[in-house]
Amino acid sequence: MSSKLTASQIRDLLKTRSHCLMAGFPLDHPLIRALDKLRNEYIIAVGLPTYLSQMLGPLATASIGECTLYDRRDRVLPLDCDNPRQPLQRFIREQFLLGELPYRVEKKKGPQPSQVEVRYL
């Protein structure tokens, strides 16, 4: 079913999942599980490198040292990175399995804390 979805539609599903989690839906809620299943099927259909490129957009080439990664419980993921200049997409591909992808990626866009670029995976 998800192979018929576009990258834009998957991004919308990821935002919906994010809103549901922020609203207090538990991780094992049927809606969250269904959205995760659609995402995983899409990743399998297009491949992880393509998926990351589509979801991260320009952030894919940002250095991992400029980014903060979060898990599904909205906790900062500790980064064990020897090269903080490594591109974000490559770091995620090398460090995370399909079911363990970061939930959210943030990159500061400017000096203000509120100037943050956010992507959902």
Image (cartoon, rainbow, N blue to C red):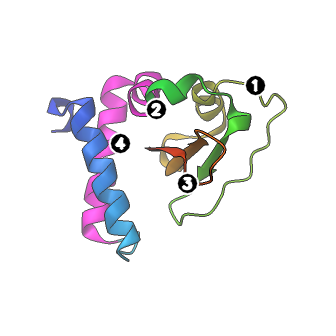
Check the image and report above or below for 66 versus 75.
above
Q: Which residue lies under the disc numbered 4?
A: 40
Q: Count the marks.
A: 4
Among numbered discs 2 and 1, the one appearing first in the sequence: 2
Residue 21 in the image: state x and y as whole percent: 38, 68
Among numbered discs 3 and 4, the one appearing first in the sequence: 4
Q: Residues within 10 Å of mark 3 (few under 14, many from 20)?
A: few
Q: Amino acid at mark 2?
A: Leu
Q: Secondary structure at mark 1?
A: loop
Instruction: Give the quadrant of residue 26.
Output: bottom left
C-alpha span from label 2 to label 3: 19 Å
Q: Residue at x 69, y 34 (%)?
A: 64
Region in magenta: 29-56
Among numbered discs 1 and 4, the one appearing first in the sequence: 4
Q: Residue at x 66, y 37 (%)?
A: 95
Q: Which residue lies under the disc numbered 2?
A: 56
Check the image and report above or below for 7 versus 20.
above
Q: Along the horizontal axis of the image, is 73 left or right of 13? A: right
C-alpha span from label 1 to label 3: 23 Å
Q: Which residue lies under the disc numbered 1?
A: 85
Instruction: Give the quadrant of residue 80.
Output: top right
